């Protein structure tokens, strides 16, 4: 009798902890997917050049702000789906060619000297037992140089 009660107790404990383990696994899975997808979309956005012929003629390569934001959101949503529609919080485009200190929304400080994009995504996960805000911050730069500057 004692062994049967211990077995039943073990089964009950197993099923009690199963949703908790599932929640943790789901949170980690969503965070990894968000990070990988935001990395891809931010890199693609950093490649959206401003096609102004005067700037290009002078060898000044900058990121097209509107196109970069659009590409970042489109690629992000294409990869993650509609339930992440409101998860991109900000996409900041910094077109600079001199060393500049930049304080990111997550509190980290970066020294940048090329056109750069900083993107932030948040998603609220509601699980069986846990409810958590998942945040991902990514930075991606575009290093395009005029061949005359390389001499």
Image (cartoon, rainbow, N blue to C red):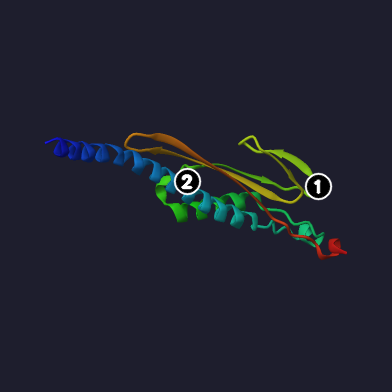
Q: Is residue 37 left or right of residue 12?
A: right
* Count of numbered circles on the image: 2
Which residue reaches farthest right? 151
Q: Is residue 56 left or right of residue 39?
A: right
Q: Is residue 53 left or right of residue 35?
A: right
Mark 1 or mark 2: which comes first in sequence? Answer: 2
Q: Residue at x 42, y 43 (%)?
A: 27
The residue nearer to you, when weighing 34 against 116, is: 34
Q: Is residue 61 left or right of residue 81?
A: right
The residue nearer to you, when weighing 101 against 129, is: 129
Q: Which residue is mark 2?
A: 31
Q: Secondary structure at mark 2?
A: helix
Label 1 and label 2: CA atoms lie apart by 34 Å
Categorize mark 1 by other alpha carbons within 10 Å: few (<14), some (14-19), many (20+): few
Q: Quadrant of residue 57?
A: bottom right
Q: Position of residue 90 (x, y in %)?
A: 57, 41
Q: Which residue is mark 1?
A: 98
Which quarter shows the N terminus? top left
């Amino acid at each position: 009798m004692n062994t049967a009660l211990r077995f039943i107790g073990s089964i009950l404990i197993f099923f009690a902890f199963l949703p908790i383990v599932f929640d943790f696994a789901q949170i980690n899975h969503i965070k990894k997917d968000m990070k990988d997808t935001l990395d891809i979309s931010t890199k693609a956005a950093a490649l959206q050049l401003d096609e102004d012929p005067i700037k290009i003629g002078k060898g000044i390569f900058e990121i097209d702000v509107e196109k970069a934001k659009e590409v970042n959101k489109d690629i992000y949503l294409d990869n993650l789906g509609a339930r992440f529609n409101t998860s991109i919080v900000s996409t900041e485009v910094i077109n600079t060619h001199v060393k500049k200190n930049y304080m990111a929304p997550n509190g980290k400080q970066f020294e940048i000297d090329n056109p750069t994009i900083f993107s932030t995504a948040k998603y609220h996960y509601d699980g069986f037992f846990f409810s958590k805000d998942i945040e991902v911050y990514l930075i991606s730069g575009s290093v395009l140089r005029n061949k005359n500057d390389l001499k």
